[in-house]
Structures are given as C-alpha cells and as structure tokens.
Image: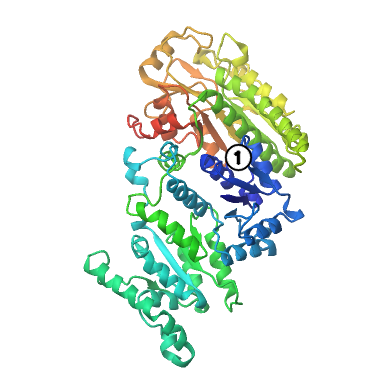
Amino acid sequence: MRIALLASRRLRHGPMSPLLRFARDYMPFLQRHDIVTTEGCYKAFLRAGLFKSHGRFFCIGSGYEGALVRITSSVVEETGDDSLNVVIYLVEPRDPTSNFPETNALKRECVVHEKPFLATSRSARAWAALTWRSENTDDLERYFIDPELIPNGGQFCFPLQHQTIALIAHDAKKSDILKFSNDYFDFILAFGRRVGTGTTGTLLNGDCPTKYKDNPAKYKKDWENVQSLCAALKEKIIAARAEGKLSDESRFVEPQNSGPEGGDVQIARLVLDGKCQTIVFFEDPDIARQHEQDIQLLERTGRTRGKKVICIHDSATAADIATKWLPVCQSKNGEPMHVATALERRFNVKAILIDGSRQPWERILDAAASYFLSHVAALSEDRKRVGDVVRVTVSWGVGMSQLAQRIAGNYEDLKLREQFEADRRQRVLGLADERYFRPGKVIETAPMQGVMAAADDAVEGNTIAKEIADFFNGKSHELALAALMAKSSIGKRRSVPTEISEHWDRTDILITTCVPVRRESAGRVRAPEFDDYTRDMKNLACGDFGGIYLTREGVTPPSDEFERIGMDLAQVKSIRYRGGHSVLVVGAEDHREEIAATILKAGLMNIIITDLDFARRLLMYDKVIAC
C-alpha cells in the first residue's frame, strides 16, 4: 500500500502535534507501507526521530513547488509505482492552505476515484487501527489494550451506543447511501443515534420525501430508482424493532432540515457541541451546489481541532471502514484502543511510547532526546518572533545526565542524515539548520532543585542545566543552595534568587525522571543524608521525582525540621495549565510503577515517555490511592 501522509503546518509543528503523534503511535503499521510526504512534514518527522530507518519513506518536494499537485496526480493514477491508495492529510481549518485549489482538488479526486481522504486525526486513527487489525499481525496486541484489563477501564470507554452518526448524500448519491445502509445496517444500528439531512434522512427511514410527493413529475425518476432500496431498508428497520434493537417510538434516522434549508448547519452544531462523532457524507463532485458554503461549514467544523470526528466522503471508503469495524462495533469501546489512548484517558497525559523489546532505556533516551530537541527548537522559533525566551527546567540524576548528552548526539545524527539525503539527491534543505536548533539567547535553563550532594557532579541539576543551555547557545541559572536545608538555617541570605523563582513560575518545559524511595544510601548517586528526614521518607513516601518526595496520596510529606529548596508542587502543576510541557521519562526498570502512577494521578505531568511494557503495567496498576 502507498500512503500520502501530511498535514497543515500547525498540525505538524512540534513533536506532540497531531500528525507526529499519529505517526508515532502507528509507526509499526505505517512502516509496512510506502509513505509519501511533503518537505515540511518530512523534516518534522525526522527531527522528531520518526521514520529514521524506513527505506520506503519519500519526500516529493515542498508545497510551493507543487507537492500537492504531484500527490493529486498519484491519486488519479489507478495503477503504477506512483499510484496512491490512501491520503492522510490532517487539515487545519484556520490555515489558509485549507482552501487552496490544490487541497480542494486533492480531496475531489479522492472522492472521484473512491480512495480514502482522511482529514481529521480521528479519521486517520480509526482507519489505521482497523486496517492494522485486519492484517492480523503479531505486534498488534502489544500496541492495543482491552479496557477490561484496566482498573475502572469502563469509565473511559466510549462505545458506539453512546455515539451519533450523521448520514448525508447529494441527490446523485442517494442510492449509494441507501445501499450502504442496507449492506451495513448492523453497523449503523450500533450507533446510539443516527441523524441525516432532510431528504436523505427520510429515505433512510424507508419513506418518500416531501419534495418527491409535492413535485412528482420532477422527482418521479429519483423515487423510482431508490424505491426498492427504501423498501428493503424499511424491512430491516421493522425487524430491528421486533428484535428489540430499536425502540418503537424512535425513528431509525432523525431527519434534520434539508441541506439548502440549513440541515448541514444543524449537524455542524451537533459536531461543535460534541454530540456527533462520525459523518458519512457521500458527495457528488460533478455539480455546483447552491448551498456550498453550508457544506464547507460542516466540513470545516468536522476538522476543528479537538473535536475527534471521523469524516468519510465516498461509498468505497465507508464500506471498507464498516467492514473492518463491524466485528468490534458491539464492544464496550468504539474502536480498538491504542495503549497511548488508554494512558491519555486514564491519566490525562500524552504518551511517547517505544518498543522496548531491545535496549529499552537506550531507546527511551533516544525518544526523549528527539522530543526535547525538536520541541525546544520549535518553541524557540515561536518565542523569537515575539521577543521572549523558552524556559527549561531539568531535574538531576544519572538518567537526566544521559539525556543531556543524547540531545547533542541526536543533533549530530540529524546532520549525518542531511548529508545522506544530499548524497542520494533528495532535496531536503535545512534538516539540521543551525539557526533553527541553536538560536542563541532564546533558551534559559535552570535546575529543578538545589544541590543533591551527589558523588558525581555530572548528575547534578546545575551541571545538566548548563550542559543543555550550552548546547542551545542559551543561558543557564545556577542554584548554589543545598536541596535540603534545616529551617533554622534558612534566612534572607540563603533564599532562592528571584530570577530562579521567576523561572520556575514561568517554566515552559519541565523534564524529569522518577525513582522509588531509596532504601539504601550507598551508591554513586544519593540524596542528602539527613537521618531523620530520610527515615520519614522511608515511612511516608513512595518515591521521588526531581528530588520531590511524594506520599501515595500525591502530596509531599510534612517536616517540622527541614525544608526542600526547589520547585514546589503548585509550580509543577501550573506548567500544564499554562500550556507548557511537564515531562516524565520513565521505564525499562521494574518497581517504578507506584511512583509513576502517583505522579500522574496527582496531575503533575502531562507527557510521559516510556516503553510499551511499562505503559501496560502502569495502566493495569491499581494500588494507587486516588489523588
């Protein structure tokens, strides 16, 4: 299969953008196929560490050089090496390119040639999950999870019985929507609610529309063409009522107004209010429509970021998705649940997951470094335009020290990749652009806490913060105070400098690891040796992150004698609410599930970077007291 995979700029900007999250989650599936993309997306993928080893990953030029024209031409071709089978083009309605002739022509040709045109993130995810499932590959079970295995998993399932499907068709496609509804009646019936624009909705109830009755001479041929399909559908509706699958009081489809009288707008309102999750709209690409603006309004509303709507535009794609979905549509979840989706629903975090079957910690570090490198660079580009800086806060430890070193290594890998692209005459300019990745004084770093009295200075927060700042040609703040101090010794002379306090209050990116409570203080890295405090931590805490100890209730244990010098929990929590990234890097080792789950349940992190096995264990962990 040959897939075009691209997105509007806003939907590919940064490592947690919808395009990159989709590609990362479905990488094992995508790597089985040829992938074609534009230069901007190609750079975004490689900068985020994706498709690095995929030999069938092709850049066909930039948008302004006609890349969309090439993709559209490949859709038109039915056979040949350049022919495309699927177009995944995540479209941002606010982006001017969403209304460019190239975008409209690409969608139109996909409809004409009955090839999937997937313009929303949920459309792409549902299609990929169902297609992956249909391939019966061995790795599928590792990446997807049964919600029944997760404690209280039913709370974040969203079965089709709780969803609404909209069914719409232009006049020339009425018979197609009726045939689809007959062939996949059980699939459509699985939805809790069905709505349709006036004429289509009436036909789907097996009735003759008013406009056919009021003007029989004009619409006689149309009614004759669809009458037998209507009759067959009505029989299915009657049978469903007899079997108790459809109540006697409810209609199979709730008709809205006709399209020209605002039916498309009514359905758009349902989408906007989160009351419609799937739109099946069989479009006639060969006519000019009197209510074109209403149709575009519905389409753009379906593409609104965060609405999680599936949009299907032709009968072949609808039949393909329904065929693959039908075996699972009666399950408690609407579609196969990806582990990353389960993590997001249970802990309200976005996940970067790696297959940790080999060298898991090394691969976690690699993923974290790629995330950090590309996110800091993308964010600094935005901040530079408005004269502001990116504020990065880092914790301490061996893992964090390794991550700082890996960031520089991943940048060198990008330079090698750029040379490789040049050698094979692939025109991808500026993949490792020095001005983009190392913009100068736009980056400020600081440690998350004071000095932890480690035997090796390389693992101290100050050292790590300076190393990262130096790489980005930025500025670092040093906190010379000890991480743990007796309250009696803390005075004005020993308070945290104002510039560091303000940095913590305005942090854009916090990145940290976590560990269980250390039962022994031996070893190369250890916390400050205050006997009473250490004893309290053993008795009260389940672990620490960045030097902050947490109880199982997600709070810091009280101490009458000592005070921790560093960010507090309120400052950590504020990062996500200000739109920043608070990142937990964990995995590859056992016995960290408790502290990781406590951190996530307490709402301290909004991104986790880990391996699949740890993620699955975390999902099924049920010993954490609700925070």
Q: Residue at the location (66% across, 56% down)?
A: 71
The residue to which callout 1 is attached is 15
Q: Which colour scheme is used?
A: rainbow
Q: In this view, does 111 lie above or below 569?
A: below
Query: Which residue is more in the foreground, 273 or 249?
Result: 249
Query: Residue 161: where, in percent of width, then height?
Result: 33, 57
Name of the residue lying farthest toward the front: 80
Q: Residue at the location (68% across, 49% down)?
A: 38
Query: Residue 299: where, in percent of width, then height?
Result: 55, 64
Amino acid type, residue under disc 1 in the picture: Pro
Query: Residue 546: where, in percent of width, then height?
Result: 52, 23
Name of the residue lying farthest toward the top: 522
Q: Can you say which quadrant of the picture contains the C terminus? A: top left
Residue 397, visible in the rendered structure: no
- The crowd level at tag 1 (other Cα within 10 Å; few <14, some 14-19, many 20+) is many
Q: Which element carries disc 1, helix, strand or loop? A: loop
Displayed quadrant of residue 474 = top right
Residue 134, visible in the rendered structure: yes
Q: Is residue 532 above or below residue 379?
A: above
Total number of numbered discs in the rendering = 1
Query: Which residue is more in the foreground, 20 or 110?
Result: 110
Displayed quadrant of residue 373 = top right
